[in-house]
Image: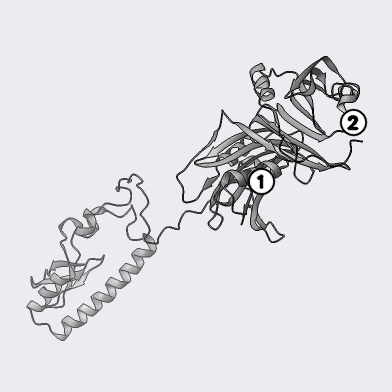
Amino acid sequence: MWTRLHCPACGAATWSPAAPGAAWCAECGAVVPPRPADVLRTFDAPGQTAALKAKPRSGKTDALIIGGLFAFLGAVIAGAAVAPWGNDEAPRDRLPAKQADAPTPDDTPEKAPGPPAESAVPKPAPPKPTPLKSPADGPVWTAYTDGKAGFRVEFPVFVAGPTTAPLGSGRDGGRVSLAVAGGTTMEVQHEAYALEKTEEELLQLGGVNYRSRAAVTRKDITLGAHPGVEFAAAATLTGQKKAVRSRVVVAGRRLYQISVVTDPDGTVPAAGERFLNSFRLLGEPAAVVEVQRETWRECSSPAGKFTVSMPGRATELQTKLEVGFDVSSRVVDDLGTAFTVQSKPLRGDPRGGWLEADAVVTAAKFAEYVRPVRIDGHPGFDFSAAKTPDGQPKTIRSRVYAVDEHLIQLSVVSDPKLSVSDKAVDRFFASFRPAKSLPMRPGPIP
């Protein structure tokens, strides 16, 4: 910045740097004393440059300008050592016009903090949920789908997912299972049959006679248009003492068994119920399991030589004896009441009093009453008891007949706390018919 002064000797105007000290006149070389600060006028360097170009200069003028520049630089350095530029102690009127109007740091109002500026760097994607690490966190229900076997089911996954394995022995099927907390295992078994059978026949063959043969409760169900059974058992098919809750459904030629297996004293957890209900057949409308209420069916046993109506699908078991077969057809309802027909070869002649002397003593060991009955000319007796022959507390209603060379016993056995309707018991007994047209065991009666 420069200051315009007037020479007292010749009256010419001269320019001097805006700094303390005297200047020299550019025309006559006389010393120009400094003027008071209140009459100084400051200009920007471009205006000063234009004013200098307005008049020609001599060599003396150039020397004076150069000297003035050196004086200006010395003054700047000296002033910086004493008071830095912008110090609050410097008078505001000595600052350049544009800087004097600008606010000082103390005059600047504080701005309210605003939201941070968004970065141009893309934000990272949110992390994917990680698997739960302990049962206390709860399960993550995960769908398992088998497109080949045609089903879908949900497992409560805690850490590891379900495992799969083939059935083996050349069977067309497999299993998928998951062990969860509390000693519980959830499993789906599926098997395709090459037999020319209906769904009802396959259910009877693979579901009732085989998989639910040791059921303590059982009821008929349907899944959409497909038949099935639901049962509970006290042991697995391999004989392990376990509490088993299972459903068997047949669709086409494939049988599905959905099971929850727990410790003998355990109960099916709530997760087990959800697992059982989550089973679906692919390619079919979503359907839920429905219980069939009126399920009385006719059961015929050529080996046992009888026909009878029973409240459900009967399991038939045959045991080879020395003189024939011990045949049992059994139905158990959803409360654990068993309807059973047992047929075995006679070891005595009923005409010789064997029925009363032996069969009554064996079958009706704890009978509360015994009374004689007959069917199609065949002798027999009817009784009730509060214990089984081996002493277990049960409520028993039973009838025993000697039919040709077979002893046939019909029984309804229930828990003492349950009340079985007389209507159901009478319907079961009245439906019994011996099979007359079947061949008898050859040879004399021992």
Instruction: Name the residue at 77% across, 22% down.
Output: 398
Q: Is residue 390 above or below residue 3?
A: above
Instruction: From the image, tell me which residue sits under label 1.
Output: 205
- Pick out the residue farthest to the bottom: 59
Instruction: From the image, tell me which residue sits under label 2.
Output: 348
Q: Earlier in the sequence, mark 1 or mark 2?
A: 1
Q: Is residue 219 left or right of residue 24?
A: right
* Amino acid residing under circle 1: Leu
Q: Quadrant of residue 414 in the image?
A: top right
Q: Nearer the viewer, mark 1 or mark 2?
A: 2
Please identify the quadrant where the C terminus is shown.
Answer: top right
Q: Is residue 254 above or below residue 235?
A: below
Q: CA distance from mark 1 to mark 2?
A: 34 Å
* Percent of width and height locating residue 105: 33, 51
- Looking at the rendered structure, the secondary structure element under dot 1 is helix
Q: Quadrant of residue 245 in the image?
A: top right
- Looking at the rendered structure, the secondary structure element under dot 2 is loop
Observer able to see residue 238: yes
Q: Is residue 91 above or below residue 208?
A: below
Q: Is residue 209 left or right of residue 280?
A: right
Residue 248's disc number: none
* Percent of width and height locating residue 227: 56, 41
